Image (cartoon, rainbow, N blue to C red):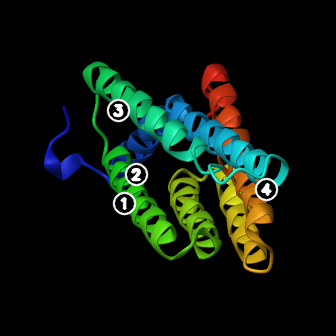
Amino acid sequence: MKTEENFTGQDSLKIINEMIETAKNSVSDNSFHYLLWGWLVLIASGLDYYMLAIQHTPYHWIPWPIMMGTGGIIAFLYFLFQKRAEKVKTYFGTFLGHTWLSVLVALFLTGFFGARFGNQTAYPVIMIIYGMGLFVSGMTFRFIPLIIGSICCWGCALTACYVGYENQLILLGISVLSGYIIPGYMLKIQFKHGNV
């Protein structure tokens, strides 16, 4: 074991790189969350669009509480399972956990305000919030697909300001496809091949 006097700058960099790699593997393995929420939001927005634009039912919003409630239960159970299996806790993992917790709170509050004041303004804000979480995650681990996905979310949010509610649902689907589902599968593939 090295003494404090023999601990060099290269040793420090090596430890930092090892911490980043450990955290990267942890996040890659948790592509589950990107895929879970990506698919649930894509399905909910698709069903909402179908029920609103094609069936013209006033109950078009029903897929949202069902899908998000189901997702919350699944994510919570998965979190408990992962917590038991967790071997090492990293600073980066903790940082991202706090980031996504703040994203979750912001999404919940935006949903509440949307229900109160109208979803027409809520969906662009939701896509902006999605983009923020994805951007922080992508930049933290230098994973380009998440960064590109965040930019797509922001582009969809900007576009959503100029279209009606029905088309915002389509943009929401595009944003989660590009920001969550595609990067989620890429993370999963890279983790399986050990390229993360």
Residue 189, position in %: x, y? 69, 26
The one nearer the camera, 159 or 65, is 65
Q: Earlier in the sequence, mark 3 or mark 2?
A: 3
Q: Earlier in the sequence, mark 1 or mark 3?
A: 3
**Amino acid type, residue under disc 1 in the picture:** Val
Where does label 1 land, which residue? 105
Where does label 3 land, which residue? 76
What numbered label is drawn on residue 96? 2
Q: Which residue occupies 70% across, 57% down?
A: 172
Where does label 4 land, which residue? 170
Of badges 2 and 1, the one in the foreground is 1
Give the position of the C terminus as an image quadrant: top right
Label 3 Cα neighbours within 10 Å, binned few <14 / some 14-19 / many ≥20: few
Q: Is residue 125 left or right of residue 84?
A: right
Label 4 Cα neighbours within 10 Å, binned few <14 / some 14-19 / many ≥20: some
Q: Which residue occupies 79% across, 80% down?
A: 162
Q: Secondary structure at mark 2?
A: helix
Mark-to-mark CA distance, 4 and 2: 28 Å
Of badges 4 and 2, the one in the foreground is 4
